[in-house]
Amino acid sequence: MLPFSIPSAGLWDRLKAADKPIVLYGMGDGAEKILRVCTEKGVPIADIFASDEYVRGHSFAGFRVKKLAEIEALYKDFIILIAFAANYDALLRRFDALDAQYEVYAPDVPVVGGGLFTHDYLSAHEQAYARAYALLADETSRRVFADTVRYKLTGEMRHLRRCETPKAEAYTEILKPTPQERYLDLGAYNGDTIRELFSFTGGTAEYIWAMEPDPKTFRKLAAYLETLSIPFTALCKGVWDRETALRFGGKGGRGSVLDEAGRLVVPVLPVDGLLQGETVTLLKMDVEGAEREALAGASRTIGACKPKLIVSAYHRTGDLADLALQIHALYPGYRMYLRHHPYVPAWETNYYCI
């Protein structure tokens, strides 16, 4: 049995029973995913709107994209499904304002892979979620875990908004990085998380390893690293549980995922093979759904070095429980913290382990 309460009604059942028109807010990959789920679930979408600055008389998924004012003029009352992600203050405040005026949901659909986080899914995996919850080191982590589960079931943003904490808290109160860090950045993007680390270490580290499989993004990463007076190793490769080559989406950002239908073939290798016994003190994994394989390929390194970990826990439907249990199995001595930083949907939900 779960040690926290969950809502009795799930989002998709609520939408199927709705007596108001349902409109989608947003375009792009997220909207396409949500439209597919709505079709599968028999949830009719009446219209699509976008933020005023993006409305240019164009169409999306067969709908003419409207402004909110047009939607308000057409329908007396309606349900809004937010279909894109936001992590900056002005847009989050816009979401909150809509939520105060209308019935608003931000459906949880996985960034990578299939399967929805529903009551049936949670019931089938209840034991794993109870075990993962029991591993958490503080009350904030337990609140984040429970509220993230509630959000995933209902799509209600209030659960996310009330459990978020600034990322700086994770660095200053949990990780406490020093200038002597030997930092391994998996999914290094353009160096943004290296810069983030430096803001807490006085702009330095002892050594940096950085892996980024997207060639275009890697060029930006390498150019940034060349400006530093710190020794580094940068690889245009992905991370996996063994050395091989895999297809890769290569679309940039959230589209940069290992994907059997991807247009690129990229080399991948395990952390244990990269480091060859070198010591790492801080290991970050934000590898767009390959976290399980990345952890498996770092088993010797984690066992020997016991580095501080930053592991993204939001790409796949089962990540919240599965990754906690996998980390614990690799090294039971970790104190495991969970934090959700300001984002809708539940992206930037990370495990911090020390």
Image (spheres, helix red, strand yellow):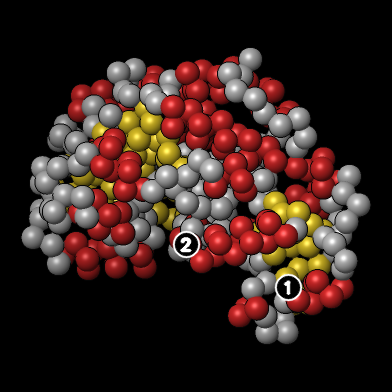
- Dot 1 alpha-carbon crowd within 10 angstroms: few under 14, some 14 to 19, many 20 or more: some
Q: In this view, does 86 lie to the left or right of 99?
A: left
Secondary structure at badge 2 equals: loop
> Residue 55, how many percent across, how many down?
67, 80
From this view, report whether residue 105 is shown above or below residue 308.
Answer: below
Residue 51 sits in which quadrant? bottom right
Marker count (numbered): 2
**Label 1 belongs to which residue?**
68
The residue lying toward the viewer, choosing from 102 and 196, is 102
Q: Is residue 219 left or right of residue 131?
A: left
Identified at 82% across, 60% down, the residue is: 78
From this view, report whether residue 268 is shown above or below residue 95.
Answer: above
Q: Which residue lies furthest to the top in this view?
A: 1
Labels 1 and 2 touching (C-beta < 8 A): no
Is residue 318 in view?
A: no
Disc ID at residue 279: none
